[in-house]
Amino acid sequence: MIREKLEDYVRTIPDFPEPGIMFRDITTILSDADGLKLAIDEMQKTLDGVDFDVIAGAESRGFIFGAAIAYNMHKPFILIRKKGKLPCETVEQSYDLEYGQATIEVHKDAVEPGQKVVIIDDLIATGGTVEAAAKLIEKLGGEVAKMVFLMELKGLNGREKLAKYDVASVISYEGK
């Protein structure tokens, strides 16, 4: 059944992973051909008129959407992965999580100085992961042209952390 809005494909699960949280499940978008097409098309529309050379996807759901958009737009696609998952020489960036730290990496030769990069991920929550991704791109001499997300949880204020970047999200939810 084709639905009119992308939000109609998102399944909301109350009190997961803890009481008071409304978990926004995108597996229902991915498992529906029309939903997946709509998600990719809507994310890609946010790039109309944007000058860029490369698309980077953040592990792991950023790979799904980023690779599809890179294919559609005939752009190279690079992987931003968790530490220890890439086989060649990398640069890394650590960032804070709610409880602890995480580190992501990109191949040292993934971005050439001066290249304009679009970073794609499924969700902007606190903004920590994608801010670290942007720092990786910048360490390599690249410029972040835009950040594109399928979904935004406004209550977690990630957009504020990314204020110096051009940020777009297709779906926005007020809460956490």
Image (cartoon, rainbow, N blue to C red):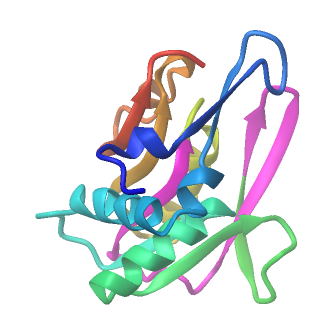
Q: Nearer the viewer, residue 45 or 112?
A: 45
Q: Is residue 160 magenta?
A: no
Up-down: is 126 above or below 50?
A: above
Residue 166 lies, in percent from the top left, at: 29, 45
Q: Residue at x 75, y 84 (%)?
A: 89
Q: Main secondary structure of the magenta part?
A: strand
69 left or right of 11 in image: left
Segment tinted magenta in the rendering: 94-123
139 left or right of 21 in image: left
Q: Quadrant of residue 117?
A: bottom left
72 left or right of 120 in image: left
Residue 61 in sight from this viewpoint: yes
Up-down: is 14 above or below 134?
A: above
Q: Nearer the viewer, residue 141 or 101?
A: 101
Q: Residue at x 76, y 89 (%)?
A: 88
Q: Residue at x 39, y 38 (%)?
A: 171
Q: Is residue 120 magenta?
A: yes
Tell me the quadrant of the picture where the N terminus can be found.
bottom left
> Residue extending furthest top?
20
